[in-house]
Structure formats: C-alpha cells, structure tokens
Image: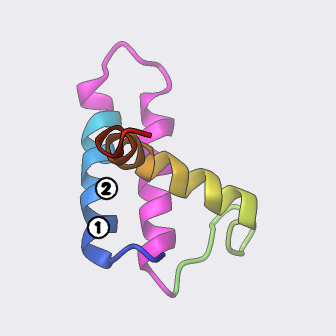
Amino acid sequence: EKSTPAEIKKAYKKQALKTHPDKNPDDENAKAKFQRVSEAYRCLTDPQYQDDEDGGMPNEEEMMDMFNEMFSDMFEAFSAEMGM
C-alpha cells in the first residue's frame, strides 16, 4: 500500500511540529531529530533528492527507519481504532 502525497505531507507536518527544537528546548537531540524528519520528507517527496553525506540515496534499512519514524503515530492510532 502506498501513501499519498497528502498523507506524507500530513505526517511530515505532525512530526516536524513534534520534533522542532523550539518546541523541545530541553532536548539536546531535538535538532538532529528534526533534521532527520526533514530529510525523510525530502527523500520521500523529491525525485531528485540525493543524500548529502554519501552522494546517494539512503539504503533500504535507512528508508524504512525514516518511514517508520514519520508514520509510527498514524499506525498506532489506526491499530488502536481497529482493536489490534
């Protein structure tokens, strides 16, 4: 099942607000978390995206980690609604 661009954008906005350093002034890792969410969004939405660190796309495991990080709240809510 694929996520629509609207679903990806909605999940990104939710995670961006949740992880933004201004919203988490006591979390020393907030900036890194926010940057990871932003990079995941770029990776999922920009067909020309290339990872700046190694000049290529993230590997499959990194992609799954980014996807899970962005959509975990949505899946938990869905599971709770379905009684899973």
Q: Secondary structure at mark 1?
A: helix
Q: Which residue is mark 2?
A: 11
What is the quadrant of residue 80 in the picture? top left
Q: Marks 2/1: CA distance?
A: 6 Å
The reply to whether callout 2 and callout 1 are in contact (CB within 8 Å) is yes
Q: Residue at x 61, y 76 (%)?
A: 50
Q: Residue at x 32, y 41 (%)?
A: 77
What span is colored magenta in the figure? 20-47
Question: In the rendering, at what x and y percent does residue 23 appear?
Answer: 24, 27
Q: Which residue is mark 1?
A: 7
Q: Secondary structure at mark 2?
A: helix
Q: Residue at x 36, y 12 (%)?
A: 26
Q: Residues within 10 Å of mark 2 (few under 14, many from 20)?
A: many
Residue 43, which numbered label? none
Question: In the rendering, at what x and y percent does residue 72 appear?
Answer: 45, 44
Question: In the rendering, at what x and y percent does residue 60 appear?
Answer: 73, 66
In which quadrant will I find the C terminus?
top left
Amino acid at pointer 1: Glu
